[in-house]
Amino acid sequence: MNSYHDFKIKGPEGTPFHVLPENGNRDPFALRCVLPEVSEIPETLVDVPLVSKSARKNYTLREVAGRQIGRVQYFLNRELKHLLDCGKIGNCIKG
């Protein structure tokens, strides 16, 4: 996953995230990484205080649940999208 510098959201190790198609992108294989809703995040991680030094703010996963946190790197998109579309892998990944 990359583009942290765009979204400035990062979860602690073990935070699950969803890989979904990035609609509206000129690349038909583009994929985005999205945090799941609060109910899908392990209870031990939901209220862990996190700091974004570049954005100069504090947050918890509860506050940013459901938001995009990055993009899949372009050289992985085509194969990963194929695996997602044919059902060989699920869209939820543990980070």
Image (cartoon, rainbow, N blue to C red):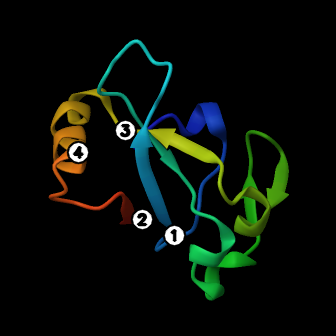
Which circle's residue, 1 or 3, is located before the other in the chain?
A: 1
Q: Which mark is residue 85?
A: 4
Point 29% across, 62% down: residue: 90
Q: Taking 83 as reference, is 22 above or below it?
A: above
Q: Which residue is mark 3?
A: 72
- Amino acid type, mark 2: Gly
Q: How many neighbours does mark 1 have within 10 angstroms: few (below 14), some (14-19), or many (20 or more)?
A: some
Query: Residue 95 — which label?
Result: 2
Vertical position of residue 30 compared to residue 69: above or below: above
Looking at the rendered image, the disc whose residue lies closer to the viewer, 4 or 1, is 4
Q: Mark 4 and mark 3: span between their CA atoms?
A: 15 Å
Q: Earlier in the sequence, mark 4 or mark 1?
A: 1
Q: Position of residue 54 (x, y in %)?
A: 73, 39
Q: Amino acid at mark 1?
A: Thr
Report which residue position mark 1 lands on: 15
Q: CA distance from mark 2 to mark 3?
A: 13 Å
